[in-house]
Amino acid sequence: MKKTGVIGLGDMGSGLANNLLKAGYETWGFDLSSERNKVFADMGGKIASNPGEVGKEADAVFVMVMNGSQVRDVVLSENGLINTMEKGSVILL
């Protein structure tokens, strides 16, 4: 597994993403905040346009959002992970 994803690039998510990048993983990210996306891109991450794009690109996706409702949206919405991730990929909550 060399391609990872992080959805939710706040304090915890950006810290995790930074460590993944430093470890040599190609890391895709998504956050509703354009400012957080920019910080992530400046670290060397690849910005996705929605959670589904992260799922399409990554073998494992860390979901670092605030509550169950947000998890449900990230995973089950029309542009959610469930619709784009390959069989054998992993969602980590």
Image: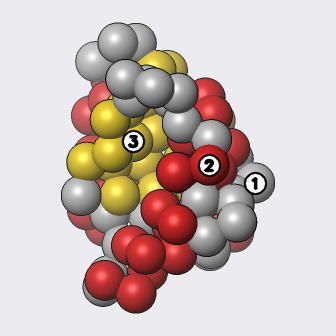
- Residue in view at x 61 percent, y 29 percent: 57
76 horizontally vs 84: left or right: left
**In this image, 54 relative to 65: left or right?**
right
Q: Residue at x 70, y 66 (%)?
A: 78
Residue shown at 62% from the left, 49% from the top: 83
Type of amino acid under label 2? Asn
Return the x and y of residue 21 as percentages of the image width and height: 39, 27
* Residue 2 higher or lower than 42, as above or below: above
Q: Name which quarter of the figure residue 53 lies in.
A: top right
* Label 2 CA crowd tier, 10 Å (few <14, some 14–19, many 20+): some
Quadrant where the N terminus is found in the figure: top left
Mark 1: few, some, or many residues within 10 Å (few <14, many ≥20)? few
Report whether residue 42 is seen.
no
* Residue 67: image location, x then y, percent: 30, 85
Three-letter amino acid code of the residue under disc 1: Ser
Q: Secondary structure at mark 1?
A: loop
Question: In the image, is residue 89 above or below residue 31?
Answer: above
Q: Nearer the viewer, residue 71 or 78?
A: 78
* Residue 61, numbered label: 3
Residue linked to disc 1:
49
In space, the residues marked 3 and 2 are separated at their CA atoms by 13 Å
Residue beneath label 2, please? 83
Identify the amino acid type marked 3. Val
Secondary-structure class at tag 2: helix
Rendering coords of residue 41 (x, y %): 62, 43
Q: Quadrant of the C terminus?
A: bottom left
Distance between the alpha carbons at the discs numbered 1 and 2: 15 Å
* Side of 43 where 57 appears, left or right: right
